[in-house]
Amino acid sequence: MAYKLFVLPGDGIGPEVMAEVEKIASFFTQEGSAAFEIEKGLVGGSAYDAHGVAISDADMARADAADAVLLAAVGGPKWDAVPYEVRPEAGLLRLRKDLKLFANLRPAVCYPALADASSLKRELVDGLDLMIVRELTGGVYFGEPKQIIDLGNGQQRAIDTQVYETYEIERIGRIAFELARKRRKKVTSSEKRNVMRTGVLWHQIINRLHDQEFPDVTLEHQLADALGMQLVRAPKQFDVIVTDNLFGDMLSDVAAMLTGSLGMLPSASLGEVDSQTGKRKALYEPVHGSAPDIAGKGIANPIAMIASFGMALRYSFDLGALADRIDNAIAATLAKGLRTADIKGSSTEPTVSTTQMGDAILK
Ligand code: NAI
Ligand code: MG
């Protein structure tokens, strides 16, 4: 059976880094280790140029029918002036919304060869391997009421509302516990129940879920502000961190800087399991954007994109052994001293191009 991948290279460095993933996917197919059927579409500025929208209905349907969607990056100065509803990011937002992707997984892995590029001391991050699970479709980014009210006396009142319901906390908690089971069996849940009612409910639901379904996983709770402090004090204490949309947004950016470069960070966004097919909708993408400053130069780091493909193999296809091969190949390539410009650091090797890095990992 072939795995159906829908590939959206997008804009800027997107097509450059995606090309390296396509090489690896066709290598696996030729080798016979797994068969991938790749279909390609347009998203972001490139979709706008072709169709006048940030993603077409036809491509949305293909994304919906695929086993996994791989997206590189969208946006760039060329589209800064296009109407708001069809700006490049709208394509990404539509994918997340229509595929109902409620869980954002952001691993922070520090390869020993790059530990000196971290904003922390080497010994604090060498061998770091944590996963932040961020709730993506609820909380204060979407809660109602959300408005600015004119008070009439020259004053205005702005309101955002944090809302979480039991089912939303349960399904994100379940993802975190299931991931932890495949890792080091520890979940740290984070909220601010000392000042927020949503935090009280979050804490209670996660505890219940743990006791009823995941007693074999160690659960601890840390208030979100304290967790921020711990992330930069002793990040290796964490395995899986589960938190809400807002705290997850901030904490995952902090975790990102522990690992060195934006060009290294993959992510996954997961949806509900389809009751008919038993499959989960999922989108895999690097954390970085389209990097217009280096687009077209062939110097972008393809590792975040390649590692995102690795996450697809692990979480959508249950091809953990192939994902391990990718991760090991990345680590080995870095250990040899190969560096794209963004992660050059103190390496004495000459800087390599996007394709040279991709080829070395493939080899
Ligand atoms: P960016 O992530 O594109 O770039 C930030 C800096 O990191 C730049 O100096 C860039 O050269 C460097 N960088 C990023 N990825 C790299 C890689 N793989 N290899 C080497 N260096 C890399 O963020 P920026 O500059 O804020 O945004 C640029 C455009 O991308 C904007 O249009 C923005 O809206 C869009 N964007 C898209 C995202 C997405 O598609 N998910 C996420 C973030 C931004
Ligand atoms: Mg953010």
Image: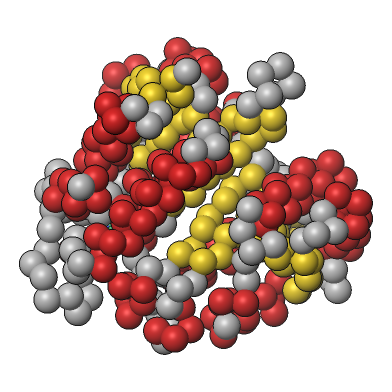
Residue at (75, 74) in percent of width and height: 222
Q: Residue furthest front?
A: 32
Q: Is residue 51 left or right of residue 68?
A: left
Residue at (76, 51) in percent of width and height: 173
Label total for image: 0
| Position of 343 relative to 272 (above/below) | below
Q: Quadrant of residue 203?
A: bottom right
Residue 281 picture location, percent across and down:
59, 30
Would you say residue 266 is visible in this rendering? yes
| Position of 317 relative to 212 (above/below) | above
Residue at (27, 26) in percent of width and height: 30
Residue 84 picture location, percent across and down:
45, 35
| Position of 193 relative to 287 (above/below) | below
Q: Is residue 40 left or right of residue 308?
A: left
Would you say residue 134 is visible in this rendering? no
Q: Residue furthest top?
A: 58
Residue at (42, 26) in percent of width and height: 5
Residue 71 picture location, percent across and down:
40, 36
Q: Quadrant of residue 112?
A: bottom left
Residue 74 picture location, percent across and down:
36, 39
- Between 98 and 259, the one nearer to me in the picture: 259
Q: Is residue 78 left or right of residue 218?
A: left
Q: Is residue 339 left or right of residue 204?
A: left
What colour scheme does the image use?
Answer: secondary structure
